[in-house]
Image (cartoon, rainbow, N blue to C red):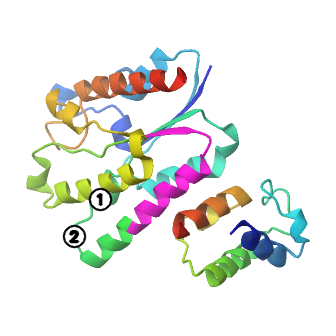
């Protein structure tokens, strides 16, 4: 799951997958703006088959929270 | 010194009615816990009529890097209040389960105590079906949090701890009882 998430994030933000780690966030990835955030959410939903709640989407601003969110839905 | 986060719905707040059961901030269980652990740092959010997702979104958005040692959370009654329209309740329960699982994963380094959702015996009269829904949501919390699900309903009934006006909110006796239970739990936790 972690590898999949890193790949999706790398694709959306157009960075090498090696640059995505547990400290990655909207503060550390320059390309992570509001539009890219929406793109990330859409990509995650499509690839993982999850429909995130509207209220939680704005809180998914770092790798740890995103991974925790995905695990809560899938595990 | 420990870092302790307290998240509650309106039950963490003092009440001013009915007048016979009014009590002060200093008599609420969060305050009593703060007084007991004076050398610890606290962050508390108590928000009336809030659902669990809205409540936990706040610390997940702003406080993950604070890394609290202990989190006490009292939430769920506002999630299970809506009456039984079967499809809606199914979605609400699923959403609740995912939310509390997520919170545990986000704050994986913290010891999280989740209080049992409880209501007085007369609440069913004004909110039919509430007892069954409360039991279902408590089962979900217990499944996710195991031994860190803090049972309080029995104690609250023993101390006649429910507000006489709405049979949902806690009175002063309930707050003292909750503080006693939680202080014991925290003490056991920090001794490990």
Q: Which residue is mark 2?
A: B84
Question: Residue B176 placed where, x, y %?
Answer: 30, 22
Q: Is residue B61 or residue B106 the one in the foreground? A: B106
Q: From the image, which quarter does the C terminus of chain B lie in?
A: top right
Q: Position of residue B51 (x, y in %)?
A: 41, 56
In this orientation, does residue B135 appear?
yes
Whether residue B23 is situated above or below residue B39 in the rendered picture: below
Q: Residue at x 63, y 52 (%)?
A: B61
Q: Are marks 1 and 2 in contact (CB under 8 Å)?
A: no
Is B1 drawn above or below residue B160 in the view shown? Answer: above
Same chain? Circles 1 and 2: yes
Front residue of B24/A30: it is A30
- Quick check: is B192 in the magenta stretch? no
Q: Is residue B72 left or right of residue A39?
A: left
- Of B49 and B77, which appears nearest the observer? B77
Q: Which of B26 and B138 lies nearest the eye of the viewer?
A: B138
Density class for disc 1 (Cα within 10 Å; few <14, some 14-19, many ≥20) is many
> Residue B108 magenta-drawn?
yes
Disc 1 sits on a residue from what chain? B
Secondary structure beneath disc 2? Answer: loop
Q: Which residue is painted at 25% across and 29% down in the image?
A: B174
Q: Quadrant of the N terminus of chain B?
A: top right
What residue sits 48% from the left and 59% below the top?
B99
Callout 2: chain: B
Inspect this view and state whether residue B28 appears.
no
Mark drawn on residue B80: 1
Q: Which residues are magenta?
A: B94-113
């Amino acid at each position: 799951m972690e590898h999949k998430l890193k790949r999706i994030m790398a694709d959306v933000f157009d960075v090498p997958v090696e640059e995505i780690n547990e400290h990655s966030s909207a503060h550390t990835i320059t390309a992570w703006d509001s539009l890219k955030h929406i793109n990330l959410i859409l990509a995650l939903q499509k690839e993982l088959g999850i429909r995130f709640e509207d209220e939680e989407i704005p809180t998914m601003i770092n790798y740890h929270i995103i991974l925790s969110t995905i695990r809560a839905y899938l595990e | 010194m420990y870092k302790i986060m307290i998240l509650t719905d309106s039950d963490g707040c003092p009440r001013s009615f009915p007048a016979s059961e009014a009590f002060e901030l200093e008599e609420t269980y969060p305050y009593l816990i703060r007084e007991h652990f004076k050398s610890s740092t606290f962050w508390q959010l108590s928000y009336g009529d809030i659902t669990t997702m809205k409540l936990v979104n706040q610390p997940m958005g702003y406080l993950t890097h604070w890394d609290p040692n202990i989190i006490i959370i009292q939430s769920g009654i506002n999630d299970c209040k809506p009456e039984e329209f079967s499809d809606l309740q199914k979605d609400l329960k699923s959403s609740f389960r995912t939310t509390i699982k997520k919170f545990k994963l986000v704050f994986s380094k913290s010891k999280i105590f989740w209080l049992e959702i409880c209501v007085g015996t007369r609440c069913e009269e004004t909110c039919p079906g509430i007892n069954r829904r409360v039991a279902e949501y408590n089962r979900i919390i217990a499944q996710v949090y195991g031994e860190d699900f803090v049972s309080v309903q029995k104690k609250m009934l023993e101390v006649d701890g429910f507000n006489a006006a709405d049979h949902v909110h806690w009175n002063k006796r309930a707050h003292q009882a909750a503080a006693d239970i939680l202080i014991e739990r925290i003490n056991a936790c920090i001794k490990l």
